Image (cartoon, grey):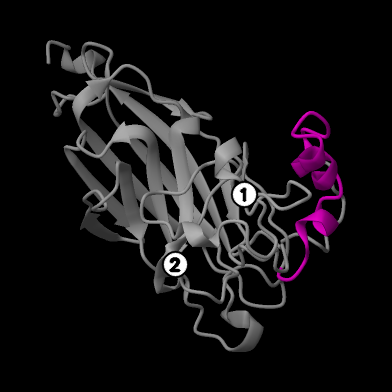
Amino acid sequence: DGIADASDEFPNDYDRASSSFYPSSNEWVTLAYEDNWPSKGDYDMNDLVIRERFQTIYNADDEISGFKISGYIDARGASYHNGFALRLMEISASNFKSASLFINGGGFDKTPELYQTDLVFKLWSDSHAFTETGESGQCQHFNTIKDCTEFDPIPFELDVKFSTPMNSLSHSSLDFFIFRKNYRGREIHFADYPPTDLFDFSQLGRIDDTSEPETNRYFRNEANLPWALKIPQQWRHPREYIDVVWAYPDYETWVESSGEQSINWFNTSDREHHYY
């Protein structure tokens, strides 16, 4: 690729020469989900808790040739069997060269999900497959109840290459979402991220959901509470059945002010018996 090996972060790959990290090479972003949408449910936001780091990879011409996402499944409080997926916002499904997933010691080749306009990867179809505890009752949940066994987080890495290099790719373009294993049309996204082409749009506006596609409002209830969160650090998620508002009292102010107040709500709680 024209870059001397001593200066090349990927000396054995001509498509790759250097990289950058978000939030940094030793920090994390936490993704947390409540899977009872369109019902508010218990709102403990621990049905799936993912810790991830985004590595943007550049070629010798300083174009983005791909990326890696490294992370862990930290908790799974869901009884429902949910999958975990990534949609690259406004990036065509045709711009795919290769992808691989390494999780918990196993490796899998990944291809884009069919019938999608954007590039969508199903990382896995059932989080239970990696988080079974072998215990009974409430202890079937993975790292959400303090009286149960605490398990090591489950490591994973997604490695994606583009067929055509890109000039920009931000973390906000990464639409991580969960979906129901036995009902692919049931997706849960971050607030105001639209669902994918495979979503069952008849669900919008039901029960507690107040989505309005015509105003680009998605996955919020009447009080603006979302069903999925992106937190810019490693986060102590609520314990099982503990509403995130109980565990983090400033969260409600942050949501109702559209993020203008209590911006550090995830660091301001001393309710240690409410979060894990």
Q: Which amino acid does label 1 sit on?
A: Ser
What numbered label is drawn on residue 52? none
Q: Quadrant of residue 183?
A: bottom left
Q: Is 243 a magenta residue?
A: yes
Question: What x and y, as percent, mark residue 242?
Answer: 77, 66
Tell us which disc is closer to us: 2 or 1: 1
Which of these two is toward me, 267 or 171? 171
Q: What stretch is highlighted in magenta?
A: 240-267
Q: Is 43 a magenta residue?
A: no
The residue located at (72%, 77%) in the rendering is 147
Question: What x and y, as percent, mark residue 192?
Answer: 58, 41
Q: Is residue 189 above or below residue 67?
A: below
Does the rendering let one see residue 47? yes
Q: Are marks 2 and 1 in contact (CB under 8 Å)?
A: no
Does the rendering let one see residue 153? no
What numbered label is drawn on residue 211? 1
Left or right placement of residue 150 versus residue 109 in this view: right
Determine whether the residue tagged by mark 1 lies in a helix, strand or loop.
loop
Residue hosting label 2: 127
Crowding around mark 2 (Cα neighbors within 10 Å: few <14, some 14 to 19, many 20+) is many
Question: What x and y, as percent, mark residue 252?
Answer: 82, 46
What is the spatial separation of the Cα atoms under label 2 and label 1, in whole angstroms? Answer: 26 Å
Crowding around mark 1 (Cα neighbors within 10 Å: few <14, some 14 to 19, many 20+) is many
Determine whether the residue tagged by mark 2 lies in a helix, strand or loop.
loop
Q: What residue type is labelled 2?
A: Ser
Which of these two is toward me, 203 or 114? 203
Q: In this view, does 59 lie above or below 249?
A: above
Question: What x and y, as percent, mark residue 86?
Answer: 39, 47
Q: In this view, does 79 lie above or below 250?
A: below
The C terminus: image quadrant: bottom right
